[in-house]
Image (cartoon, helix red, strand yellow):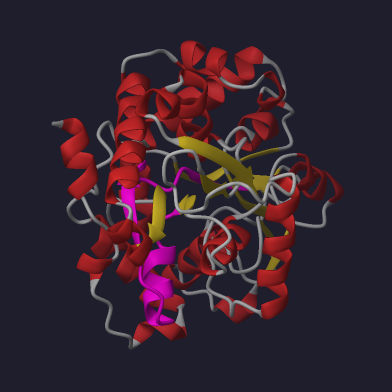
Amino acid sequence: MRTFSKISAAAVAGAMAFTLSACGGDSSADSSGKSGGKVKIMVGGLDKVIYLPAMLTQKLGYFKAEGVDVQLLTEPAGVQATTSLVSGDVQGVVGFYDHTLDLQVKGKQVESVVQFAQAPGEVEVVSNKASGDLTSPADFKGKKLGVTGLGSSTDFLTKYLAVKNAVKVSEFTPVAVGAGQTFISALKQGSIQGGMTTDPTVAQILEQKLGKVLVDMRTPEGSKAALGGLYPSSSLYMNTDWVNGHKETVQKLANAFVKTLDWMSTHSPEEIAAKMPADYQQGGKELYAKAIKDTLPMFTKDGVMPADGPRTVNDVLKAFNPNLKNARIDLAKTYTTEFVKKAAG
């Protein structure tokens, strides 16, 4: 999920060290994506339902069927995933589309090549203890609110909801608590009163009766209500120069992902859950299937960017982010439909 903080040398070094470790020091891997090499894709949390198409595509065998060797890596939040792409350590990221806008302002040309989702898939939850005086984003003032990481999309979406409801970003405290068990523990311990997270974490919080939903952005309708329109989020984004130099490989990736999105649209949550790794099913198979069911409406069926989506993202970011407020962003350069349209055809 998505960086708006300055990308430091230390962060880049950390991302590179992680990736080399995740690759098992495989120096023979050809990062060009040519035949015989690997295309490395960093995911901002492989076990998150919002990024489910990445692992599902691998499990369905669609990468292999296209003849492309994909290595999926994972980071706890998209902010680190973006750093890995900027450092040149991976060829693609499965993360939020909004990074493409932020990076353009910073002089980096990155584009979404497959748009997985048309809504954020994010949920603002509140602990039961704090639910009495935290009933809407208008009550964020003075609160400690959990986000996956500082500079992540959960961070900036929280800021947008605050600003939209007349709360200054300086009037509440975002706390980096990750997702999954670390988020749940923070909610239990009271170190946060609420926070933004995704499934399957949301399903576990509700199942354990630790809190309730404050703002639900898992559906197109929820996105429109909270953000003013469809909000393209989960995507495969890549450096534009790399895309232009490796169109055959990018087309194979698009073919594989579009097949997966189509497969998801014709199969039940239970069938989807059965394809995923068993250790993703925290809380059991039934709860995991419910988490998928609740999040499925966010996904596109063809990987195509929703027509007004980029404008909504632009409006949201400019509402609170000083780096983007007065910047001129060429939205046409932040995504391409070239590959997904060929895949669908």
- Residue 99 in magenta? yes
Quadrant housing the N terminus: bottom right
The answer to whether residue 127 is above or below residue 281 is below
User: Picture quarter containing residue 340?
Assistant: top left
Q: Residue at x 33, y 53 (%)?
A: 246
User: Residue 28: where, in percent of width, then height?
Assistant: 63, 47
- Residue bounds of the magenta highlight: 96-125
- Residue 233 in magenta? no
Name the residue nearer the viewer: 34 or 66: 34
User: Picture quarter containing residue 258?
Assistant: top left
Q: Left or right of 153: which side holds 319?
A: left
User: Residue 19: where, in percent of width, then height?
Assistant: 68, 54
User: Residue 34: where, in percent of width, then height?
Assistant: 42, 46
Number of marks drawn: 0
User: Residue 67: where, in percent of width, then height?
Assistant: 39, 30
Quadrant housing the C terminus: top left
Is residue 68 in view?
A: yes
Q: Residue at x 57, y 40 (%)?
A: 72
Q: Residue at x 40, y 62 (%)?
A: 98
